[in-house]
Amino acid sequence: MSDIKDATLTPEVRRLHKGMDEVWGNPTGLRALTVVNHTTVGLRFMVTGAIFFLIGGLLAMLIRTQLAFPDNDFMSHEIYNQVFTMHGTVMMFLFAIPILEGLAIYMIPKMIGARDLVCPRLTAFGYYCYLFGGIILASSLILEIAPASGWFMYTPLSSGEYSPGPGSDFWLLGITFVEISALSAGVELVVSILRTRTQGMALHKMPLFAWYILAMALMIVVGFPPLILGSILLELERAAGMPFFEVAGGGDPVLWAHLFWLFGHPEVYIIFLPGAGIVSTLIPVFAGRPIVGYGWVVAAIIIMGFVSFGLWVHHMFTLGIPQLALAFFSAASMLVAIPTGIQIFVWLSTLWLGRPRMTLPMLWIVGFLIIFVLGGLTGVMLALVPFNWQVHDTHFVVAHMHYVLVGGMLFPLMAGLYYWLPQVSGRMPSERLGKWSFWLIFLGFNVTFLVMHWTGLLGMRRRVFTYDTAMGWDIYNLISSVGGFMMSAGVALLILDIVLHFRFGKKAPQNPWGADTLEWAMPKPPTAYNFVSLPAVETRHPLWEKPELSRTIYEGEHGLNTIDHGRRETWGSDALTGKLRETVHLPSNSWWPLFSSLALAVVCVSLLVRVYWVAAVAVLVGVVLLLRWSWENGAHPGKAPEASMAPTDPPLHYHTMNGPGVWCISVSHLANGSLYLSLLFGWFYLWVVAPEWQMPETSPLSMPLLVAAGAALTLGTLLLAKVVRRLRRREGSGLGLMMHLAGGLGTLQTLLIVAVMWLAGLAPTETAHDATLFVALCYVLILAGLGAVLCILQGLRVGYGYVSVEAPLEPVVVLRLWYYSLVVYWSLFVAIWVLPTVLGGGA
Amino acid sequence: MRRLLKLTHPIHLVSGLTIWGIWFVAIYAGLSVACSVAPPEPESDMFTGINLGVGVATLVTTALLLWLTWASVVAARRAEVRRECYFAYTSAGVFLFSAGGTLFVGYPIVFLPPCL
């Protein structure tokens, strides 16, 4: 078929398309800011990420200009420090992660046969957090007060004593803000992949790209919180003087390194996995056969996801850790070569057994294979402790890192860009310009970074802003700089190609590459609702086995093909089998995401300029906005204009007790739990390792009050569990009263924790011990307060009829939060009161 | 809950690596605490209680993971549904990797002192 849009539709089907357009369509003008649709927001993520890539690239060229010649005074060392710090920060946090998330946000619903992600407003909220955080961070460059301690912000260099300006604050606050975006995308991608695949798409039948994104999203959810905690602690140290990382106050700067790399190493794989997902998607298409060893790839993805969390210390081999511990991490670092090798051999086997077509996307894939394998080999070299000691902090490491990241992420991303461009625009890119751009980037990259290995082996340290000609590094640096500019020319051509193709590109046929996945079964450019009807899919290659799917979907022959109710709907399916379970009613466009993220931006800026009362007010406003946003949920009439269902369709999700909301809160608790475990790690780490740690003989915390607060929490949880059990039995009497009672118990717990903090007389600016206790108590205080407020709101919603026996989902979601709080509270009680009391202050 | 214990359930795609992860954290944290609280004499070289403890934990974990590998293969052969067979075989591969990974990471206790 040339294009499904050329198909002749019956008047009834035309009406269906028109109705879908009205319900799902994007508004224009100022109201475009309210758009929550995954296609639009995904594109916004990618375009914003591309802009930050250009900024990061510009910074890279400044670095190469400075290093091109010895004794160069193009930049002062102060500016150079800011430039290289921001280059790494922008590329890692504002380009790599967001653009890949944008791709996932854009592509996942289309690949799994859904109409949108499961929390569209969260998608928009995440985008605005990313945008505002990125702007705040980038503005520091213009003001010449950018962070200057390297992209991993090691303490004590980044602490107040050695970095007194606001540079580090920009990094800590800006990055934390941006990470809200990453976490929100991570949570909803996990839940969307597991719970909104189209009918019949069992877990082992879903596209490999979805497996990769599932692993990436879970890694974000677990991997980002340690850095968020580290950033909060370091900002508290800088702004309020709490000595978490100061030896004299009982802290330890190495704790920062642990928290950073607990995030930082998985981050590398978070970036690589979507890239590998693109490769695993494209190679079968261009080889014209299914991938060899789908199961092997799935196993390799899972192994990579896990093992990558066991490698963080290999960034810290020179920090004085015992050799046996180094050997553990060295071995674990080598282990990761196994899943990587599995994937590479799977890709090569697929090409070997197929009939590869050397198209433009494949050119980038070949480039990826060469560069990434080289980067992987130097990775194994760096995993060896003695070699690592030799080249630590030299340009060898810089070269390795770029081979892995550019090879593992940028090249597949470019392959994906050329592959999916016709899907986005409906037009084909220029082969000639594309090839020129590829060769310039490929050659430029290798000229820059292959040579840099030698520069490093000759001893040139990273981060030095200039060097003496006697060092013998001149020619290598000059060659690297020439290569860098060659690469820039390639990027310029690439941008030109993409811009021109929108105007001059040939019209793309329906499935230009002969692909097998569902994203090619929709009109191009895609409609806001993706599919006018949702097909049943029970194969890994739907378009290869049923090429007519594009037409039958477009002609409304499959499921959920009514729109008279005015709702945005997609299937909710069983995570394992893909059997239909419910109809997920998705929220529509809204101002709440923008307003809520604006409030958080005000918090961020006011903390930067240290006007704390404004920050406090903005926090309050932000909380109110978020709660107001949550109010328009479930059976709220503002969200559900009509609740009638076709008799054959499964029930609306809020009429069930296991809708996607339950999954969202559970996955959120993975992130929350990761943050909490990082905090516990910090507590025990400082207790055991910090040389000046001061543990008092008796705990300053009141045991009776702590137990009373825990009792209130336990009673509240039991009460809520009873509420949920009764709802399962369809007993709704006294529902509102019980929710208010649980809210009261939550309030009591909150007040008791405040009393504990008040009576403890903590001196958090004096000792790391008291500072850690203070943060831990704040954490349970926030959980208690949130639990109380949500229960009280639930009580009110019962009164309005939004929560009832007919709409029982929300109490189940709130109960999950209480369960989490219960586990956290009592385990924290053991960690901060029982153990110090039993082991004593001298332990 | 009983469903989760069956080796044909996809939860076992991650259970082997979770066991590996718990073992890994336990030996690293245990080593750090032991070296901080009761470091052995440097002359003891690798013949210390710490090495012995880590070694025992490593062997027990490896044995458990190898048994799970075998049990998964058996479960895959007995599975009647294609999906269950698929998950059991894939889990077996991950269990086997985890067993090998445990042994490989724990192996340095044979030739390195714990706290130097």
Image: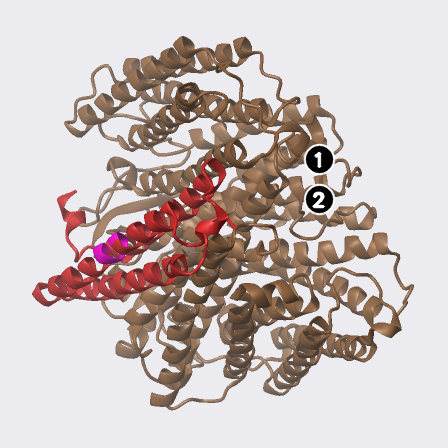
Chain colours: A brown, B red
- Residue at the spot 36% in from the left edge and 73% down from the top edge: A8
| Vertical relation: A208 (above or below) A670 | below
Quarter of the image holding residue A800?
top left
Q: Chain of mark 1?
A: A
Quarter of the image holding residue A389?
bottom right
Taking depth in this image into account, of A27 and A399 the one nearest to the observer is: A399
Would residue A27 appear left or right of A833 to someone viewing this image? right
Q: Which residue is situated farthest in the bottom direction here?
A: A355
Tag 2 residue: A136
Q: Residues within 10 Å of mark 2 (few under 14, many from 20)?
A: many
Q: Residues within 10 Å of mark 1 (few under 14, many from 20)?
A: some
Is residue A74 found inside the magenta-colored segment of the image? Answer: no
Q: Earlier in the sequence, mark 2 or mark 1?
A: 2
Residue A803 placement (x, y as % from top left): 30, 26
Residue A757 placement (x, y as % from top left): 52, 14
Q: Are marks 2 and 1 in contact (CB under 8 Å)?
A: yes
| Vertical relation: A549 (above or below) A216 | below
Please state which amino acid type lies under the numbered disc 2: Ile
Taking depth in this image into account, of A729 and B69 the one nearest to the observer is: B69
Question: Secondary structure under badge 2?
Answer: helix
Would residue A166 appear left or right of A724 to someone viewing this image? right
Residue A467 placement (x, y as % from top left): 85, 67
Instruction: Give the magenta range.
Output: B60-64
- From the image, give the main secondary structure of the stretch colored magenta: helix
Tag 1 residue: A605
Is residue B61 found inside the magenta-colored segment of the image? Answer: yes
Residue A673 placement (x, y as % from top left): 41, 37
- Residue at the spot 47% in from the left edge and 52% down from the top edge: A325
- Residue at the spot 36% in from the left edge and 84% down from the top edge: A349
| Vertical relation: A225 (above or below) A151 | above
| Vertical relation: A83 (above or below) A355 | above
